[in-house]
Image: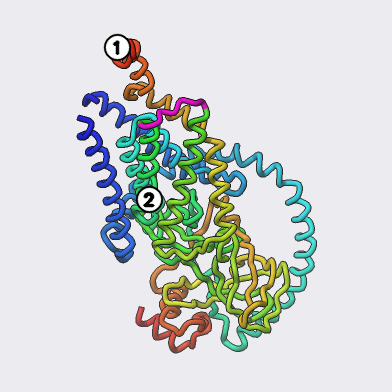
Amino acid sequence: MYDKTVRRRRAVLALLVVLSLILLTAYFGEASGGGLHSVQRGFLTVVSPIQNGANKALKPVRDFVGWFGDTLHAKGQRDELRKQVEKLRTEVIANQAEKHSYRELLTLYKLDNQLSVSDYHPVTATVVAKSPNVWYSTVTIDKGESSGVHVNDPVINGEGLVGKVAQAASDGAQVTLITDSSVGVSARIGASNATGIVQPKVGDPNDLLLQYLPANTQANRGEYVVTSGTVSSPDDSLYPPNIPIGQVTSVNEESAYRSVNVHPLADLHNLDVVQVLTAASGTLPANLSRLAVSLPPGQNAGQASGETLASTQSGG
Amino acid sequence: MNASFSSGLLLRIAALAVFAVFFQIGVVSEVPVFGVSADLSPLLVAFVGLLCGSTTGAATGFAVGLLVDLALVQTLGVTSLTLTIVGYWAGRLRELRDPQAALTPLLVGAAAAAGAAVGYSVVQFLLGVDAPVSFELLRQIVLGVVVDTIVALPVYAIVRRCLIGGLPDDPRRRRRRAYTTGGLSPLSRS
């Protein structure tokens, strides 16, 4: 009897471990359109409304707990923001004049078709689930393909770039955050034209590193890092240019390429509402995204020749 | 274990697991403490193992892991594998040692959280996820274990309260009953 119980117990453990390993191997080995991924998307479709409902029902609990932390930090944040407002007010006045001249020059040289956020159709979505462990920088949102959300669509919030859509179901989607090791964003430091790639800082999943900048790039603490509007690999999303990503915290000079540490502007730990920048087929952003992945890495799709763009549009 | 008892317990565990996973991803993950969020899943699995035994613990670990991986669109099987082992270990602890100290849930919770975090990291490294061992990663794991340890006692109380009606015989009570009725008494052997 004892032997039978022991054998049964060990058999159950072995079966479950083997099942887990089979799942893991099959999932890891298959393409994103494979069977297990489809099951996962199906599950996401089913649970998205439940998650959405639970998220709304439990919001007061979250807000109550969050209130304590917010209160503790409020005073320090207020003082810091006052200083920022003073600094930014001065910069806005200077920028307004420059912006006017810049627009005139763009029109003059026929470069005013550059991609911008206003070319997209933003879909506002609520974050309904978030991974609890340090290994996955992903969140689940309550809008999916039925709202026009597609894989690789850029995701932003009021503070800056958040990430991109990794998987989309009909009524929900998984967003990979910019702190995930699989994401690389082509970016530049606000005032300079030197571009690099923003990736999570090795060993620190909450910080970013702008890498592969030319060695002579000037960077100062506090400068803003924004998207450059280019793609670095065919898997990348074409983020529209000038979306703020983060602020420079320090500069590393130990290698041939310069790299700077960047602190993300978006509070990725407390995401509540985000916007997915969607683009209908045939529109400028959709055509440029398609064009961008066919261009050599680093080339600016937004400044692609008019002929190429025209042929793409007629083809699409 | 008769059939009705077993199905009642399974139903309770299933309801508890589904609620815990949704509560985890909907609320707990959104409330960082010391910069990390508590992870209820290893605690739930370990306490089910501690209260119900190794087989139930392992099965609960597999099911909760699968649910977490499906709901969060993570690599299927990673959480299942880790939590299966956590549930089995906690169940074996009950079957072999039968710990009765008041702080047992605290220690089991800490060990389960640490085991799950380390196991998870090892599997991720084996899968080639690009995140080398670093002080920051270690800090996140340690803080996660600390936060899980803080919430271990209330989680244990809730799990025990939910399962108490369908729990199998407490091994200590069973031994005591056997002893007092003569089954294990030295007097009965002489």
Label ID, residue B190: 1
Circle 2: element type: helix
| Quarter where residue A52 is shown | top left
Same subunit: marks 1 and 2: yes
Q: Is residue B38 above or below residue A155?
A: above
Q: Amino acid at mark 1?
A: Ser
| Quarter where residue A312 is shown | bottom left
Q: Chain of mark 1?
A: B
Q: Chain of mark 2?
A: B
Question: What residue range appears in magenta?
Answer: B96-102
Q: Is residue A245 left or right of residue A28?
A: right
Q: Is residue B86 left or right of residue B145?
A: left
Label ID, residue B48: none
Q: CA distance from mark 1 to mark 2?
A: 57 Å
Magenta residue check for A170 = no
Q: Residue at x 38, y 23 (%)?
A: B164
Magenta residue check for B98 = yes
Q: Residue at x 54, y 80 (%)?
A: A113
**Earlier-in-chain disc, 1 versus 2:** 2
Front in this rendered view, residue A297 or B158: B158
| Quarter where residue B183 is shown | top left
Q: Residue at x 40, y 28 (%)?
A: B98
Q: Is residue A176 above or below residue B103?
A: below
Circle 1: element type: loop
Percent coordinates x, y for residue A298 in the rendering: 51, 82
> Which residue position holds label 2?
B69
| Dot 2 crowding, Cα within 10 Å, few <14, some 14–19, many 20+ | some
Res. A110 visible in picture: yes
Q: Amino acid at mark 2?
A: Asp
